[in-house]
Image (spheres, coloured by chain):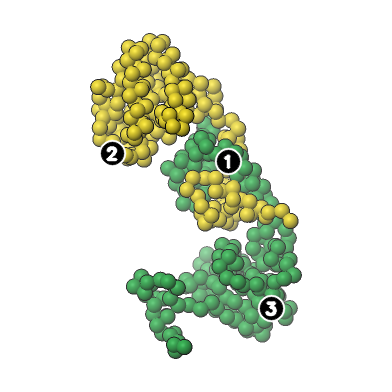
Chain colours: A yellow, B green
């Protein structure tokens, strides 16, 4: 006899971050007992999302179109470009600050030991973009980790090579904290009082 | 323009228990960044589960077949029947104990104010089953809440009407628990029903 569907469902929920056996069971039972419509909807949207959501060819953020809505928008300030490690970091800045410039999502950070170099982070395309001459300031919002710092220094060099001023959100971000989890107020303040990179 | 698929996905994850906006975002990004295969699988199994998993017509537990594997099994002891409030309670007993009898899943507890009476809990079918004469003992494993207690007393009466012996799991101090941290009700009950030391 094949594995019961309910067991398959519990196992499938474990793909989600922080979801162990017990939580996965609770999720499966909850959906079956009280959330079948929501479960049906989640199944549909999730199935569609994993097939259709790719990356914006300009900023590398998640996008279902070749160019994401932000890159395609005429109302953003193209003189400002903000480099972040992940889509979650980009979303945190977008939601917490009044930033109206554009983004570049590295989808990682420099990590030679893991084989993640400039090419893996799309820095050749970032270089080409900086060479276009429209960007005047590159706001480097990597995380305050060793690898994030190394990445920031690499990006600052790249910016200067193309006559672009590198800057960073002001100190005030808690040391060792992931940018994604910083409270809005701190993030907004740090972003607003960013300083030029030495 | 329609709502972006990514926002729809975040919203859809919120059907899961204990999942707020922030956690839903993390789940969506995690699946897209590192778990597309798992996400595809979850979408498929979830979609199939909400359509195909119904209730066993004999014990009311979740089942994809008219009779669940436990009820259909010839190796369970049909003289013992255990009544529980939910499929999760049934699973906890099945996983923690060596119980080899059968189950009856109430899918709730008596709650007149919410319109949940004997009929909603399937107690007419439970009565018919007890009348068949095969069940000798009804183990009542409802939760120790006011409504769970009321349900337990109703079930005990029903059992006696059909000449079936009602029983309950023992209440007392949890094994390995510090006495200091046990709730008052449990401690009081355990103290009052103390037994002679062997
Ligand atoms: Zn873009
Ligand atoms: Zn059954």
Residue on which disc 2 sits: A174
Q: Which residue is denoted by mark 3 in the rendering?
A: B79
Q: What numbered label is drawn on residue B39?
A: 1
The chain holding disc 2 is A
Q: Chain of mark 3?
A: B
Mark 1 vs mark 2, CA separation in Å? 33 Å
Q: Secondary structure at mark 3?
A: strand
Q: Chain of mark 1?
A: B
Dot 1 crowding, Cα within 10 Å, few <14, some 14–19, many 20+: many
Q: Residue at x 49, y 45 (%)?
A: A17
Q: Residue at the location (43% across, 20% down)?
A: A123
Does residue B192 appear anywhere in the picture?
Answer: yes
Residue lying at 43% horizontally and 29% vertically, measured from the top left: A112
Measured as percent of width and height from the top left, residue A178 is found at 36, 38
Give the mark toward the camera: 3 or 2: 2
Q: CA distance from mark 3 to mark 2?
A: 63 Å
Q: Quadrant of residue B163?
A: bottom right
Report if residue A73 is visible in the image.
no
In the displayed structure, does residue B172 sit left or right of residue B99? left
* Residue B130 left/right relative to A95: right
A192 sits to left or right of B140: left
Q: Residues within 10 Å of mark 3 (few under 14, many from 20)?
A: some
């Amino acid at each position: 006899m094949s594995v019961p569907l309910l067991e398959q469902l519990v196992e499938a929920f474990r793909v989600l971050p922080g979801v162990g056996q017990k939580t996965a069971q609770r999720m499966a039972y909850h959906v079956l007992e009280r959330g079948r419509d929501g479960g049906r909807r989640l199944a549909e949207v999730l199935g569609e999302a994993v097939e259709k959501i790719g990356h914006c060819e300009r900023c590398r953020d998640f996008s279902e179109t070749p160019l994401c809505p932000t890159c395609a928008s005429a109302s953003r300030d193209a003189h400002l470009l903000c480099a972040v490690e992940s889509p979650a970091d980009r979303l945190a800045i977008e939601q917490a600050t009044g930033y109206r410039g554009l983004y570049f999502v590295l989808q990682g950070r420099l990590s030679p030991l893991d084989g993640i170099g400039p090419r893996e982070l799309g820095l050749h395309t970032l270089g080409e973009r900086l060479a276009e001459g429209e960007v005047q300031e590159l706001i480097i919002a990597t995380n305050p980790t060793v690898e994030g710092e190394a990445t920031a220094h690499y990006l600052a060099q790249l910016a200067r090579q193309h006559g672009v001023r590198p800057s960073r959100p002001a100190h005030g971000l808690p040391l060792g904290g992931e940018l994604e989890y910083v409270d809005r107020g701190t993030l907004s303040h740090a972003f607003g009082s960013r300083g030029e990179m030495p």
